Amino acid sequence: MATYIVLLGPPGVGKGTQANILSKKTGLVHVSSGDLFRENLKNETDLGKLARSFMDKGELVPDDVTIAMIKDRLSRPDCKAGAILDGFPRTPVQAEALQKMLANFKGDVNLVPFISAAPSILIERVSGRWTCRAKGHIYHQKFNPPVVAGRCDVDGSELYQRDDDKAETVARRINVYLEQTMPLVAHYRSQNKLVEVDGTQPIEQVTNALLAEIKK
């Protein structure tokens, strides 16, 4: 029986990090909707071209295009045992579509961990990020500062802050995420599939809490 886990959590909570660790520990494939979009756009697949046609007009990519990308990815042989979904679904409508899709694979969403942290903590985590211009190495002014301020330890190139990582942008992204996701949280809570995990703990403790829930 395949296992499908939907990982929820606001920007900066460490969702991607946990998804990668859980993938290695459980053997389930990490399916990130963001990575999937980039892959389809880069490889100019039919779905990538379709998505780009909306993006070029400044429009949101419709649900059915995103759902088709997810379906294509989950139908590959490496997802036979299931997957850890990160970034999809984002709305109850997408959640219903996922449920129908998984029924075709003789599966269902087994668990929905919601990694949470106070917005103030998330803003500090994300807005402290600095990126190296040459190779994209990531630093953090508090948790992982460079040896020389403003310079990458690896290649000596300048460090800069992406617009997405600026405090005001981060605050806005978190608010938008929470507004959009709360109906999804309620949706999965009503199905007794949601478990809340404290994202302010050290990475290893968050991983252990998630693994304990998966084993249940």
Image (cartoon, helix red, strand yellow):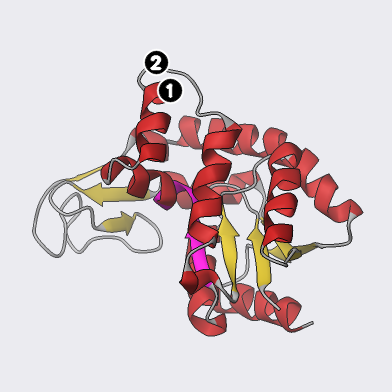
* Closer to the camera in the image, 82 or 182: 82
Gap between marks 1 and 2, in whole Å? 5 Å
For mark 1, give the secondary structure: helix
78 relative position to 211: left or right = left
What residue sits 38% from the left and 23% below the top?
Answer: 53
Inspect the image, locate mark 2, and give the three-letter code of the amino acid beneath it: Lys
Q: Quarter holding the C terminus?
A: bottom right
Which circle marks residue 214 in the picture? none
Region of the chain picked out in magenta, as a range: 29-35
Question: Tags 1 and 2 in contact by the CB under 8 Å rule?
Answer: yes
Instruction: Confirm whether residue 141 shows in the render.
Output: yes
Residue annotated with mark 1: 54
What residue sits 27% from the left and 46% below the top?
Answer: 43
* Closer to the camera in the image, 111 or 72: 72
Residue annotated with mark 2: 57
* Closer to the camera in the image, 188 or 116: 188
